[in-house]
Amino acid sequence: MTGVPTCRVPVAGRDSLATVNQRPPAAPSLARDKGTDFSAALIPGPWTHRFISANGSRFHVAMAGPTGHEAPLVILLHGFLEFWWQWRYQLSALGEAGYRVVAMDLRGHAASDKPPEGNDLPTLTRDVAAVIASLGAAKAHVIGSGLGGIVGWTMAALEPRSLASLVVVGAPHPAQLWRPSLLVSPRAFAQMALLRAPVVAERALLSGTLVGSLLSTWSAVEGPSRATVRTYREMMRIPYVAAKSVDQMRWLLGTYRWRRPRRRLMRRFDGAESPVPVLHLHGAEDGLLRTASIAAPRYGGADYHLRVLQHVGHFPEEEAPEVVTEALLKWLGGIERPGAAAED
């Protein structure tokens, strides 16, 4: 079909070529069986699916835009409960703008490897830096939402040479997690307690009830569509994803065996400022994080910009995709063309 983009999806060691529509597809209807195969995460669209070996594991990425190394590299990192598809709107738009865009499944999620260890922030940070190197780039613009944003903050401290700039969406600086009572909204406290509970959280995620509940209560008034919730529920049913997701959250919360290594990392943040420009986007109606406590100029450095998005919850890239895409294009344009102003 002339003029219609194609998506190359590797299946069982081979590539099968699928013709897709220009617009990002609606959330797919996935079969409910005893489990979901990781290939369900290879959703067709105006992007290409690849698997990249880095830091001793294999990572799934969805790529859009130019393939040459001369184009600026942009890495998109998803949050808790989600996977690369969270960035489906921005993936296409940034690619069309000339950026080499890579939306990555973090370790333990969707179609990426799920080794038993490596749920800590330093490992997740090394993963992203290694993927950037495997893509043949010295550095990249890293854009992360939720957990992905926290990984981005950590890269500024542990892997600064891999960063060209940083955008965090709906994510606090990791050092702010020392005082969760000042950061987490009252209605999310019970949910955080549930995530700390052994076995219970994993079962709730696998059943799908907790996924829908968190996506709804953390979003603005309307919340995600039923089809979108169904997609994220199915991804959580891929073997080991629920357990890895909860373990990563428990590491952030300093639960059980993670307390000591987490303290060591937090000391690394003391007095550390980001060496690269930082854009911080936050939804004014975020159901997880208090807007009044989210600002992090102490860690963002001299080139830190906070923008609060009105009528948006914890998932701005999905709740207000046009607004987020416009903000990202303006930000990246200002970084790549010195002298262009970033919007505060």
Image (tube, rainbow, N blue to C red):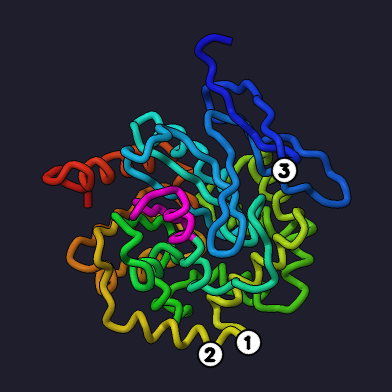
Question: Would you identify the image quadrant in which residue 10 lies?
Answer: top right
**Residue 309 place in picture, x, y as percent:** 35, 50
Q: Start and end of the magenta stretch?
A: 128-145
Residue at image x 70%, y 35%? 14
Q: Is residue 90 left or right of residue 194?
A: left
Secondary structure of the residue carrying tag 1 is helix
Specify the quadrant of the image occupied by residue 188.
bottom right
Q: Say which amino acid is labelled 1.
A: Arg
Can residue 29 be seen in the rendering of this structure?
yes
Identify the residue under disc 3: 39
Q: Residues within 10 Å of mark 1 (few under 14, many from 20)?
A: few
N-term mark: 1 or 3: 3
Where disc 2 sits, the SS reads helix
Q: CA distance from mark 1 to mark 3?
A: 32 Å
Quarter of image, res 21: top right
Q: Which marked residue is nearer to the observer: mark 2 or mark 3?
A: 3
Q: Is residue 123 above or below residue 93?
A: below
Does residue 185 show up magenta in the picture? no
Residue at mark 2: 260
Q: x, y percentage for residue 179?
A: 44, 82
Sequence-wise, which precedes: disc 2 or disc 3? 3
How many residues crowd mark 3 within 10 Å: few (<14), some (14–19), many (20+)?
some
Q: Depth check: 99 or 323 in front?
A: 99
Residue behind mark 1? 257
